[in-house]
Image: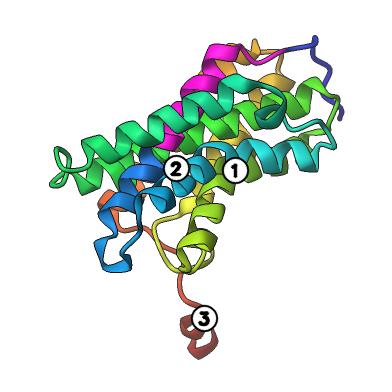
Amino acid sequence: MFITITPFQVTLWIELLAAGLGGLQGALIAAGARSRRIDVLGVLVIGLAVSLGGSLLRDVVLNQPPVVIWSNWYLTVAGASAILGMMLRPVLARADWLITVLLDAVVMGLFGAIGASKALSLGVGAAGALVVGVIGAIGGGMLRDVIMGQPFSFLHVGTLYAVAAGVGVGALVFLAELGTPIPIAGSVCVVLTTLMRLTAVRFEWTFPEQFAIRRW
């Protein structure tokens, strides 16, 4: 079954909100990694990577001009948010859970909703839109992990990082197939992604390690 929807353009302020929160969260994480001795430029670069990485990878997959390059607003908002993150890190030093889990989950939900919505607006099928949405959701985190030289978060035993994004994006695609307006479906995507991620962390839900499956 194919999804038929009317042309939809993600509102600019929503994309800039996602970019701003991504830059803030990336800079907060980088500034808090003191053992790696990341300088001010490094914190800014990591903030930009988290802020713009998902959008960049999404547009590459969709064979579209990267919006983060063609519009000055994205780089401006992302850079300002990263600088704000550096300034706020001393104040939020004891709020690691807020930074690494809650803010990260909201950012994933926003980028997942934007990615899937853009894919659907271009006529991509349901399965493809799901993939594009997940790529958009976790793309910034992937680039962050590459720059910081650490394992990809979504590939290792953890708290259902990519699964949370998939649940939210899957709900958006399903609702769009039923004819639900994209803004409403996108809001559901953000809420479900956030709740799934927070619940998984709270109750320590994980997939079993492959060694455990082999022993079983």
Residue furthest bottom in the image: 215
Mark 1 or 3: the one toward you: 1
Q: Specify the quadrant of the image occupied by residue 9.
A: top right
Q: Residue at x 86, y 27 (%)?
A: 2
Q: Nearer the viewer, residue 201 or 34?
A: 34
Q: Is residue 190 visible?
A: no
Q: Nearer the N terminus, badge 2 or badge 3?
A: 2
Residue 18 within the magenta-colored segment of the rendering: yes
Question: Percent position (x, y) of residue 139?
Answer: 59, 47
Are dots 2 and 1 in contact, CB under 8 Å? no
54 to the left or right of 98: right
Specify the quadrant that holds the N terminus.
top right
Indicate the secondary structure of the residue bearing disc 1.
Answer: helix
Res. 47 mark: 2
Q: Which residue is mark 3?
A: 213
- 48 vs 119: above or below: below
Q: Main secondary structure of the magenta part?
A: helix
Q: Residue at x 40, y 44 (%)?
A: 26
Q: Which residue is mark 1?
A: 53
Magenta part of the chain: 9-23
